[in-house]
Image (spheres, rainbow, N blue to C red):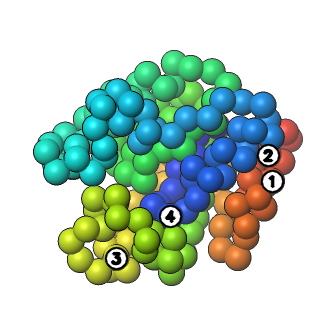
Amino acid sequence: MNIYIVGPMGSGKSTVGKIVARSLFLDFLDSDEEIEKTTGASIDWIFDLEGEEGFRKRETAELEKIVQLNSHVVATGGGIILSDHNRNLLSARGVVIYLETPIKTQVERTSKDKDRPLLKDGDPKLILTKLNTEREHLYKEVSDYAIQTSDKSSQEVADQIINIIKNK
């Protein structure tokens, strides 16, 4: 079984995923890092060269490989849930955990990161709010469990996921 962690930018998917993987003795993958390894290019560069549509095609291709693996915790990119195909893959191949994160927290966590293509051209708070409006229902649709991350440390969020998995 795989554990897929979905949620918006800045929700802590990678940080929490690494803690969960270590605690449950599973392998960890970050879908964006896997895309970078496969292409030899940064996500930012892929967006610049191919646009979001080109990146989403690469994201789906990488997810199709990832879901063939077993015993992994996978931190997904924030937009992976935009595709029906991707949501079906996630749902069919493991447990999906949605990290619900307030916009304020997302803004704080992404403010120093210059490698977020969707936040390059405009006010991050407005962009993150718009993305949340477009995506929140998709995160909820695909997830088996949702965890509120506000006022919780990464370890506390990871502990909740570990409890869910152990009691499943």
Front tag of 2 and 4: 4
Label 4 sits on a secondary structure element that is loop
For label 3, the residue is 124
130 vs 44, nearest the viewer? 44
Residue indicated by mark 4: 10
Left or right, 151 with reference to 140: right
Instruction: Give whichever of 120, 135 is nearer the camera.
Output: 120
Q: Position of residue 83 (x, y in %)?
A: 33, 42
Tell me the kind of residue under disc 2. Ile
Other-residue count near label 3 (Cα within 10 Å), few / some / many at <14 / 14–19 / ≥20: some
Instruction: Give the residue type at disc 1.
Output: Asp
Q: Amino acid at mark 4?
A: Gly
From the image, tell me which residue sits under label 2: 162
Percent x, y for residue 113? 41, 65
Q: Give the image quarter of residue 57.
A: top left
Nearer to me, 75 or 147 = 75
Could you tell me if residue 82 is visible in this image?
A: yes
Q: Are marks 1 and 2 in contact (CB under 8 Å)?
A: yes
First-in-chain label (2 vs 4): 4
Say which residue appears at 57% left-offset and 53% top-offset: 13
Residue 27 placement, left or right of 166: left
